[in-house]
Image (cartoon, grey):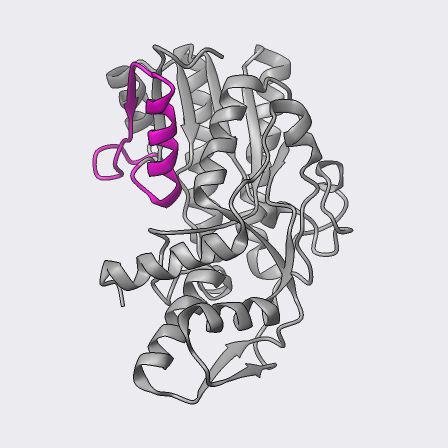
Amino acid sequence: MELRGARVVVTGGSGFLGRRVVAALEARGCAQVFAPRSAQYDLRDRAAVVRLYRDTTPDLVIHLAAVVGGIGANREHPGRFFYDNLVMGVETLEQARLAGVEKYVGIGTICAYPKFTPVPFHEDDLWNGYPEETNAPYGLAKKMLLVQSQAYRQEYGTNAIHLLPVNLYGPGDNFDPASSHVIPALVRRMEEARLAGRDEVVLWGDGTPTREFLYVDDAAEGIVLAAERYDEPAPVNLGSGVEISIRDLATRVAAATGYTGRIAWDVTKPNGQPRRALDTSRARAAFGFRATTSFADGLAATVAWYRESGTA
């Protein structure tokens, strides 16, 4: 798809990832990029989605809006995470089809993968088991949106694609302890402990699970490349290709923040999925995406932003 001169709707475009996607689209010469706010257009409401497309007449829709959070938030709000994410995706794609939108980019989640997926996760493994229980409602809602995009492509010829980004991090992330993901949560915990002079930080689980992280600017570039170059039904992983244990991650965050106290593990709390790491070969082959930000550089930028933002 030629982006120069295109009119684009980016749902969630004022959020952590969305702002980067909007900037990347503008850099490619899009005629207009709209970032609707939920106060104006409730994407769970069909009439609001119809009105959004009538008001903006987009050529491309990139659906980033989501209700997300860490293990605690997923355990507390499984119903909300399922319903809101499913309905927003269903309505934004259905109304895009009816409005004749040229292309739709859906953003899924690696929480959709089975709990015991062989590492590295390959897209062909997506249906080989049930997701990890604590985030299954969110992951399954997103997986149904992949099914929808493939069904619409088959029946209506809709150019809808589905991307599976790994955990994102970077400046501007959500550092709210009630809903943040692991990196911002650790940065806040370590920085607060350092400032308060505490000699111990207690973290959930035993530290053995592994995760992969993608710097937010790299993720935005991957999404825009896919919008430009990809037109196939198969989902595509977006990741860095680097796997790290939560224990090692905690040590690195402590070093980046200057926290020198003890890190303890509360093994009565859940670990989440045992391992997460992606096979990123399809993204490289299909649309030339490769992450370029090293984890050390990305983490340093994240800590610096948190300190400068006054979020603490």
Q: Which residues are magenta?
A: 14-43
The residue sitting at 45% across, 42% down in the picture is: 85
Q: In front here: 121 or 160?
A: 121
Task: Identify the image quadrant of residue 310.
Answer: bottom left
Q: Position of residue 165 (x, y in %)?
A: 55, 41
Residue 136 relative to residue 61: left or right: right
**Front-lying residue, 276 or 38:** 276
Res. 78 in view: yes
Q: Residue at x 40, y 74 (%)?
A: 189
As for residue 21 lying within the magenta part, the answer is: yes
Please state which of residues 21 and 126 is positioned toward the viewer in this rendering.
21
Which quadrant is home to the C terminus?
bottom left
Residue 160 is situated, as x and y percent measured from the top left of the image, at 54, 21
Q: Position of residue 47 (x, y in %)?
A: 30, 26
Residue 79 appears anywhere in the view: no
Horizontal and vertical percent position of residue 289: 58, 31
Q: Magenta segment: does it hold 75?
A: no
Q: In the image, what residue occupies the spot 64% across and 15% down?
A: 154
Residue nearest the viewer, comparing 267 with 208: 208
Q: Is residue 121 left or right of residue 189?
A: right
- Above or below residue 12? Residue 73 is below
What's the residue at 63%, 31% (across, down)?
Answer: 283
Q: Compared to 21, does 263 lie above or below?
A: below
Q: Is residue 116 above or below residue 38?
A: below
